[in-house]
Amino acid sequence: MREIPVDTSGLQVVCMGEPSPKVADRATGEVKTDAEGRTVWQVEVAAKPADASGGMVRISVSGEPKGLTFGQLLRVEGLVALPWEQNDRHGIAFRAAKIEPLSPSTASTKPVRGGGEG
C-alpha cells in the first residue's frame, strides 16, 4: 500500500473524542495490533488549516495515546494518508507515528472554527 506523507505544520488539530482501540474483526470484536503486537488505537480529530475550513478524520496510531481530552489541541507526528480499495468501496485511511497534546507554550490562541462560518 502506498503511503502519502501529510504535512501537518500548517494545521490546527483538535481532539474530538477519547482514543479507542481499532477493531480488526467486527464479528468477533478482535482488536487490531501492529507488527510488534501493540494495540492500534483510533483518535477522531478535526483538522483544518488556520485560514480555512476543515473536516473530521480518524487517525490510527500504535500504542495508547495518553492525556487526550475533547477540544484539546494536538500534535500529530509522522502522519500518512493510505488510499485503499476493497471490492466496490474505496477511501483514505490516516495513520500517525505519534499523537500527543500540544504543549501550552506552543498552543495557538486563534480559535478553531468549523466550516461555513464567516
Image (spheres, grey):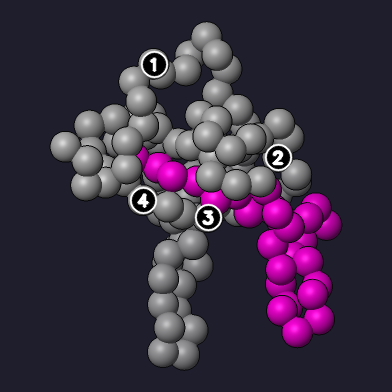
**Front: mark 2 or 1:** 1
Please indicate, yes or no, whether residue 34 appears anywhere in the rendered image. Answer: no
Residue 57, compared with residue 64, is above or below; it is below
**Sequence-first disc among 1 and 3:** 3
Residue at image position (63%, 54%) is 42
Q: Secondary structure at mark 1?
A: loop
- Quick one: 73 or 114, which is closer to the camera? 114
**Sequence-first disc among 3 and 2:** 3
Percent coordinates x, y for residue 33 in the rendering: 77, 61
**Sequence-first disc among 2 and 4:** 4
Residue 51, compared with residue 21, is above or below; it is above
**Which residue has dot 2 on it?**
65
Residue with the most extreme front position: 117
Magenta residues, start to end:
19-48
Residue 100, picture quadrant: top right
**Which residue has dot 1 on it?**
109
Residue at image position (43%, 83%) is 89
- Give the number of the disc on residue 55: 4
